[in-house]
Image: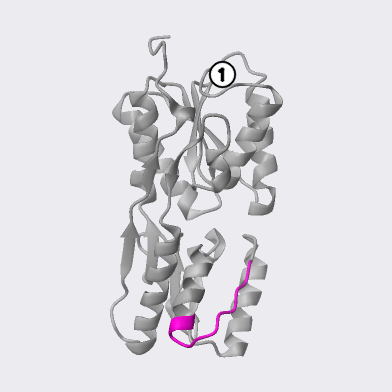
Amino acid sequence: EISRAVEDMAYQNRMRVILCNADEDPEKEALYLDLMRDEKVSGVILSPSLSILARFQMSDYPFPVVLVDRCERETAADAVVLDNTDSAYRLTAHLIEHGYQRILFIYDATSATGRQRHQGYVTAMATQGLQTQVKVVPTPVRATVDVAHAIVSELMQGPLLPDALIGSNGLILLGIIQALREVRLQFPEQIALAGFDDSPWTQLQGPGITVIAQPVYHIGQAATELLLQRIAHPSQPARRIVLSGELRERGSSARRMHATD
């Protein structure tokens, strides 16, 4: 929906859109950015990999850039982001309020988004004096579902299961669900489940999956507006728009019947 919003806004302003998917591959990402130089584009809306973000400088590019979804707090660039830390805090607090204490967080350490969401989880657990349990998906996005699946499958062999699982993005959440289905573990009866990204399938899994929904179309609109403003006013200060995620509570995180177990 982000790309749809960008295209809609571009059409209204009689501009063309070039869409590139870098698959979290820094080399592919750099190649596409070089291509944008060759094409002499008016501007770029970029969801950067951690590698690109770590060394990002606006002066490196001959065109204006607006970052979406992923941006460090100290990055001096126009950006539209979700309040990832607060969203993860609220999602974790929701599970705690429903009686879950052994909450395992599975996140993508290769993205700023994953690390920010991890911080929100850690803070929520610490606030209640609960011990954190974390597993990291260190691989590119193409393998995320499989790696998350493998992590959960291994957990199922352990002596003590978590009360609840949180996946830090939609692909990780999908891998978790696949693994739970294979061992016929029911949620929330045997384990609670929550995550990020309100993909259509999250409403169709069992009692529905509790998620933080991102205002994705709004993100695309806001990013395009920032880019158009930057094109019109190249010297204006960098702006950052922070949007809130919506907690959509469904059956996968239903209140635990025996919260003191």
Q: Residue at x 65, y 61 (%)?
A: 23
Residue kind at label 1, given as amino acid type: Leu
> In what quadrant of the picture does the C terminus appear?
top left
Q: Main secondary structure of the magenta part?
A: loop
Tag 1 residue? 161
Name the spot of residue 2 as percent of width and height, x first.
49, 64
Residue at (47% x, 80% y) in the render: 10
What coloring was used for the rendering? one colour
Along the viewing direction, whichever of 256 and 152 lies nearer the viewer: 256
Question: Relative to residue 41, is residue 89 drawn left or right?
Answer: left
Question: Visible in this render: residue 140?
Answer: no
Where 88 falls versus 32 (above or below)? above
Residue 154 percent across, percent down from the top left: 67, 26
- Give the quarter of the image for residue 223: bottom left
Label 1: few (<14), some (14–19) or many (≥20) C-alpha neighbours in 10 Å: some
Which residue occupies 54% across, 48% down? 199
- 41 in magenta: no
In this picture, which residue range is highlighted in magenta? 11-21
**Coordinates of residue 231 in the picture (x, y in percent):** 39, 86
Q: Give the residue displayed 56% in from the left and 62% down from the top.
A: 51
